């Protein structure tokens, strides 16, 4: 079986006033379909950057990334976006819902971008599944943080993703909301069978994944 | 010193984080526009004045019934001005055949004329050639009609006083001959001034007009005028271009009004950009201010800090804008000179200084209101990330914007009434655009579409109602200004040009006797010319105003003194003449035709202090006739129709001695008609006003060229507004674009969504702007230019389609960096 995400010799440097700063250094990584991998590490260790690179949201300084069997360096922005559409789901710490659309429209737009038009019913069902049946027509600013993250979950799983990238999905939530969102998140993952790459500080959350990788100082990955 | 350094450091920091660069851009554009247009206007105005000065033969004329003291000419010469002297007087001419005729003699020196040129011909009514000199010694030039009246040919000898002269040329045109042609019943004879003593015609008791013409630099003329103000000598009358022919004066005033208003539109559009940029700058500073407050900074200190930054940015950007504007006008002037085929006068420095002052005023007036809220923000709210800076107080904003706009408009218009008009119009424009924008965006937000991506575009507009209506207002102002200086410019200038269409009367006939009426009509039929309307004209002196004897010297202005002293040409009419419009009171009804009523030209009445209901008594052939003023009229002098300062009801002038006057169009190929007309009606006086019409047409064309360049600056100001507005929503747009990109959206789809959103905004702004442009231009056409405007459909199409396409493309281009940025970068930054 082919890995769903692989990274070889992956590095990322940025220019600063004091010279070049290495954020990620020589990362080797492989995630098989259905795997759940947690990436942990101290603040500023480059966890979110690694997640973004693996999802094709940014280009590495060196090394190669294969996502869903495609070498990302060979794809342009549009080809990367097309690869993500319908195959990749995202859950961000800051939710990143589109404020101009209602909860159901936020889910629907992910389906539309995946080439599945007129899926209002399916979007509605997912929102019911995350407990937002009564809040479907509310706009993000009218929802609490926990509710917004549940809309984001529905949006991520709506396209039945083969891989899910999650960056601190409970980082902005209180304890109660956090637990609720985490339970929903792992239930849905099991239900859809998506591979998972989860960036988190939360050891409980990391423990629910199949394995944990830690990014240390200097951007090196340790198992 | 520390404070200044801190301010400069703060500016450097804020410059990188955005906000200030847009304020600087908007200000630089505004100042660049005001300076360029100011310098360019000044140069075009001077060129126009110089052209118009040809109707005076000089830049300034001093005249008197007595010999002008030599120190007046000496003073002008000492200021390095050119001076020419003339004497004008009536006299009798005697031909060798013994025929006598009253003539109007004009003795001129060798420098005559200082502006323009006389035209003479080898035979009467021939094609005039520019006269490079004045008549030679012992020679005279005579007006064509004299040759037919006394039956002599060019070359004949005539006696004038004690001297015999040879008629060497027919005088076709005097550059300064229009100003009093209605009063010049006798044909003109021109001679050289040095020949005058030999005629023995001028004695201390002679009835003569002494005249000094002056021309030169603006500075010299100003100094000379100031000296004249202090020179106390009774009976010296000063005439400038402004006192020239009403048609030229009116054309100049209109051109000046239009250019002034056009350049102001740039400042107001840029003001909208400054306001929006300052609003977003203040919003971007909320966290900094909250932290400063936590660290103990007082509200006063915070306000001082940010006002100081604004003022420093305003000073620098205004200076840069001023320099760019000064340089930019050179390019504009070169283009204009190429189009006009003439050289413009050198540029003055003061419009640049004015432009910089305008920049500072605009920065404070439009940019201060958003900053005033900074010290009062909720610290806890900001630190929790719940609140930004509240929108500025509506009343403070309105007050500051009104005060600034009003001040700037008054500075430009120099007239309270015009300022109120423009302010009122601008306020209506702003309110209409903002309210119209709000309503239309609200309606758009209510549109139901099934696809979420379409809904995203629509909801983006509907959700940002406040910001959206502000953007519609800003874009609308820009588009309205653009429409007015482009599409409506064509309509306005065409309409203005149409007031002197190709068939405009170019010949005036005066002294037509009532018994010649029928024969004259038959002559026109025989010559295949349209039969013109003949107007009765009765001459009378104004003797009493509301029963009190009129004393011309009692009037404060020279123009009023001249009006009061001279003989009036009165006419009677049943109907309001075509090129007249009643501005006060009412025109007489059929039942009032037998009453003794008067209608006066409004500016004329104002200068003489005459109001509706006043009684005016005229002495006509020794008989006093009194009428009551029942209406005031605005007269389109540049229509070249026969017009009168005073029109009476037929009942007032019945039975009084009268002659008839008319005007008609004579095409160049029918020039022979003139000679036949004069031969058949020798007592009739004919005037050719072709060159006057040409001058008015040229002034309109010069204004037209100038306005085309104002368009460029309105466009730049509109771009500054666009950048300010786009920057305000860039953070949110960048975040949304990154999310959509992460979800798999293609670049094309992202561009399309942004384009559609801006295009909708631009379309709405364009539609409202077209409505505003049509209404404003119609009012301008009526009140400033004096004609009824019929705007074409193109203004609506261009407003809507141009607004949608222009704003759509410009908005998308302005966001290109946001759309092209890697999604992770956008998400991390937000």
Image: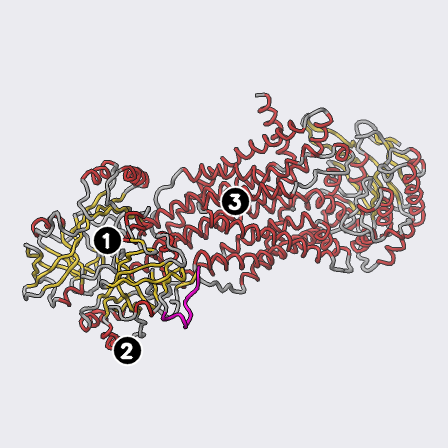
The CA span between labels 3 and 2 is 57 Å
- Residue occupying image coordinates x 59% and y 55%: B803
Q: Which residue is mark 1?
A: B117
What crowding class fits label 2: few (fewer than 14 Cα within 10 Å), some (14-19), or many (20 or more)?
few
- On screen, residue B622 above or below B731: below
Which chain does tag 3 point to? B
Quarter of the figure with residue B666:
bottom left
Kindly identify which numbered label has been placed on residue B347: none
Span shown in magenta:
B584-594
Relative placement, left or right, of B59 versus B421 is left
Q: Nearer the viewer, mark 2 or mark 1?
A: 2
Which chain does tag 2 point to? B
- Residue occupying image coordinates x 77% and y 48%: A98
Which chain does tag 1 point to? B
Q: Nearer the viewer, mark 1 or mark 3?
A: 3
The percent position of residue B464, horizontal first and vertical second, equals 71, 49
Secondary structure at numbered mark 1: loop
Secondary structure at numbered mark 2: helix
The percent position of residue B553, horizontal first and vertical second, equals 28, 47
């Amino acid at each position: 079986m082919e890995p769903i995400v692989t990274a070889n010799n992956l590095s990322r440097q940025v220019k600063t006033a004091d010279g070049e700063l290495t954020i990620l250094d020589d990362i080797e990584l492989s995630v098989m379909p259905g795997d759940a991998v947690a990436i942990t590490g101290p603040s500023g260790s480059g966890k979110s950057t690694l997640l973004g690179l693996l999802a094709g949201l940014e280009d590495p300084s060196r090394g190669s990334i294969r996502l869903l069997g495609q070498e990302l360096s060979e794809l342009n922005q549009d080809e990367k976006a097309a690869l993500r559409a319908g195959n990749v789901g995202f859950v961000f710490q800051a939710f990143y819902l589109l404020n101009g659309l209602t909860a159901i429209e936020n889910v629907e737009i992910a389906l539309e971008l995946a080439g599945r038009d007129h899926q209002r019913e399916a979007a509605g069902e997912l929102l019911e599944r995350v407990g937002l049946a009564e809040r479907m027509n509310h706009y993000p600013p009218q929802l609490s943080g926990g509710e917004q993250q549940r809309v984001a979950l529905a949006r991520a799983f709506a396209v039945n993703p083969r891989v899910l990238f999650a960056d601190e999905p409970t980082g902005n939530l209180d304890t109660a909301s956090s637990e609720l969102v985490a339970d929903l998140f792992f239930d849905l993952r099991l239900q859809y069978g998506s591979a998972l790459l989860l960036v988190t500080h939360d050891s409980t959350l990391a423990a629910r994944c199949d394995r944990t990788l830690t990014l240390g100082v200097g951007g090196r990955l340790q198992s | 010193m520390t404070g200044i350094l801190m301010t400069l450091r703060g500016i450097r920091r804020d410059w990188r984080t955005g906000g200030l660069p847009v304020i600087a851009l908007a200000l630089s554009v505004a100042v660049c526009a005001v300076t360029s247009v100011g310098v360019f206007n000044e140069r075009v105005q001077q060129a126009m004045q110089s052209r118009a000065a040809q109707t005076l033969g000089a830049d300034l004329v001093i005249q008197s019934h007595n010999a002008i003291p030599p120190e007046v000419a000496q003073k002008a010469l000492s200021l390095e001005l050119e001076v020419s002297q003339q004497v004008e007087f009536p006299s009798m001419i005697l031909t060798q055949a013994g025929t006598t005729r009253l003539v109007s003699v004009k003795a001129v020196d060798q420098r005559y004329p200082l502006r323009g040129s006389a035209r003479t011909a080898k035979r009467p009514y021939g094609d005039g050639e520019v006269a490079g000199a004045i008549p030679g010694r012992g020679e005279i030039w005579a007006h064509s009609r004299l040759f037919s009246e006394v039956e002599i040919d060019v070359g004949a000898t005539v006696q004038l006083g004690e001297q015999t002269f040879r008629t060497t040329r027919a005088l076709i045109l005097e550059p300064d001959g229009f100003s009093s042609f209605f009063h010049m019943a006798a044909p003109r004879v021109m001679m050289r001034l040095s020949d005058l003593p030999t005629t023995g015609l001028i004695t201390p008791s002679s009835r003569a007009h002494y005249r000094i013409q002056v021309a030169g630099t603006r500075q010299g003329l100003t100094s000379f005028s100031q000296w004249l103000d202090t020179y106390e000598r009774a009976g010296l009358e000063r005439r400038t271009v402004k006192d020239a022919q009403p048609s030229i004066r009116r054309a100049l005033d209109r051109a000046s009004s239009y250019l002034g208003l056009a350049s102001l539109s740039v400042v107001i559009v840029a003001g909208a950009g400054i306001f929006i940029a300052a609003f977003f700058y203040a919003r971007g500073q909320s966290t900094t201010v909250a932290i400063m407050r936590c660290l103990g900074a007082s509200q006063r200190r915070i306000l001082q800090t940010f006002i100081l930054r604004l003022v420093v940015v305003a000073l620098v950007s205004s200076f840069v804008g001023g320099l760019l504007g000064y340089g930019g006008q050179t390019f504009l002037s070169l283009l204009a000179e190429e189009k006009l085929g003439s050289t413009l006068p050198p540029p003055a420095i003061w419009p640049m200084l004015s432009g910089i002052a305008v920049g500072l005023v605009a920065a404070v007036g439009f940019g201060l209101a958003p900053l005033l809220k900074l010290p009062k923000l909720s610290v806890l709210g900001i630190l929790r990330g719940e609140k930004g800076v509240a929108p500025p107080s509506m009343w403070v904003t309105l007050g500051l914007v009104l005060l600034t706009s009003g001040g700037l408009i008054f500075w430009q218009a120099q007239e309270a009434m015009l300022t109120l008009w423009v302010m009122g119009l601008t306020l209506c424009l702003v309110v209409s655009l903002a309210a119209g924008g709000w309503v239309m965006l609200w309606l758009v937000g209510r549109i139901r579409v099934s696809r979420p991506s379409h809904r995203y575009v629509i909801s983006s507009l509907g959700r940002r109602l406040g910001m959206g209506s502000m953007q519609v207002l800003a874009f609308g102002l820009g588009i309205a200004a653009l429409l007015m200086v482009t599409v409506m410019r064509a309509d306005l200038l065409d309409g203005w040009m149409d007031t002197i269409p190709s068939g405009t009367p170019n010949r005036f006939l005066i002294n037509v006797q009532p018994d010649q009426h029928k024969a004259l009509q038959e002559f026109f039929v025989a010559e295949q010319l349209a039969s013109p309307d003949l107007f009765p004209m009765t001459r009378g002196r104004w003797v009493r105003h509301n029963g009190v004897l009129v004393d011309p010297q009692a009037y404060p202005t020279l123009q009023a003194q001249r009006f009061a002293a001279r003989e009036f040409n009165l006419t009677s009419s049943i109907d309001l003449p075509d090129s007249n419009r009643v501005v006060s009171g009412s025109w007489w009804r059929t039942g009032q035709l037998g009453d003794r009523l008067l209608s006066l030209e409004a500016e004329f009445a104002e200068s003489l202090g005459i109001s509706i209901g006043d009684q005016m008594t005229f002495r006509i052939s020794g008989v006093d006739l009194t009428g009551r003023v029942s209406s005031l009229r605005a007269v389109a002098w540049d229509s070249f129709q026969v017009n009168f300062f005073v029109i009476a009801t037929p009942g007032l002038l019945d039975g009084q001695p009268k002659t008839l006057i008319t005007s008609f169009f004579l095409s160049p190929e029918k020039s022979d008609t003139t000679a036949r007309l004069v031969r058949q009606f020798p007592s009739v006086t004919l005037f050719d006003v072709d060159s006057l019409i040409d001058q008015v047409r040229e002034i309109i064309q010069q204004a037209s060229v100038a306005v085309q360049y104002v368009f460029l600056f309105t466009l730049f100001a509109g771009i500054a507004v666009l950048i300010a507005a786009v920057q305000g929503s860039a953070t949110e747009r960048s975040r949304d674009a990154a999310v959509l990109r992460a979800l798999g959206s293609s670049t094309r789809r992202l561009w399309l969504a942004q384009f559609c959103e801006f295009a909708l905004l631009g379309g709405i702004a364009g539609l409202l702007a077209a409505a505003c442009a049509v209404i404003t231009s119609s009012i301008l056409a009526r009140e400033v230019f004096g004609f009824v405007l019929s705007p074409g459909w193109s203004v609506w199409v261009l407003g809507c389609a141009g607004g949608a396409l222009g704003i759509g493309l410009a908005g998308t281009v302005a966001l290109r960096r946001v759309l092209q940025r890697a999604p992770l970068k956008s998400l991390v930054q937000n």
